[in-house]
Amino acid sequence: METRIESLPDYRIAYVRQVGPYGAGNVRAMEELKSWAEVRGMLVDSAILFGIPQDDPRLTEPDRCRYDACIVIPEQYESGDAIHTGRFLGGQYAVITVKHTAEDVQKAWSEIIPAIISSGYQVDNKPIIERYTGGLLKQHLCEICVPVTKL
């Protein structure tokens, strides 16, 4: 597994929050967000989307797990509608690119932490994210981004 370290900037985001067991609800939240963004002309090749599981399902009851489907929006964008807006706080991330299938993403989640530790980093106390861009989506790929600090 090829891992690279990348510094992600802070972004202003619009998001749809799904509360409940991770899985099909996450897909619905992302589709709702993408529909919202498409109508507003934001779902272009340069768009950056994030899937952010906010809770560890080993520590949080499944019906209380939060998942945010996000898209980067311009700083000056005035929402004025029912979608939430907020900030993504950037930092150092270990990034791997994987096929966007349930099996490949699950495999990556299980392998990335040992790979990070063996490369001299530790996982930082922020959510692990899935990042999607127009170019990656067309190739059926996504990136798993794990917040890290150097040991």
Image (cartoon, grey):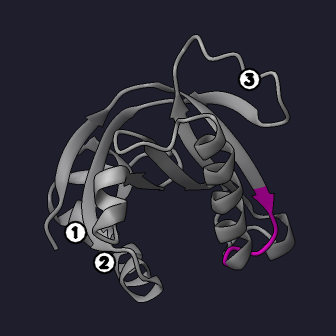
Q: CA distance from mark 1 to mark 3?
A: 40 Å
Residue 137 seen in render:
yes
Task: Give the number of the disc on residue 57.
Answer: none
Mark 2 nearby-residue class (10 Å; few <14, some 14–19, many ≥20): few
From the image, tell me which residue sits under label 3.
79
Instruction: Out of 45 and 53, give the one closest to the viewer.
Output: 45
Q: Quadrant of residue 59?
A: bottom right
Q: Give residue 95's position: percent from left, percent from top.
A: 27, 55
Point out the image quarter for the C terminus: top left
Point 36% across, 50% down: residue: 133
From the image, tell me which residue sits under label 2.
111
Left or right: residue 77 compared with residue 116: right
Q: Report the amino acid beneath label 3.
A: Ser
Query: Where 22 sits versus 45, above or below?
Result: below
Disc 3, SS: loop
Q: Report the amino acid beneath label 1.
A: Ala
Query: Where 103 sits versus 105, above or below?
Result: below
Point 17% across, 65% down: residue: 118
Which range of residues does the magenta coloring cover?
A: 18-23
Question: Is residue 21 inside the magenta stretch?
Answer: yes
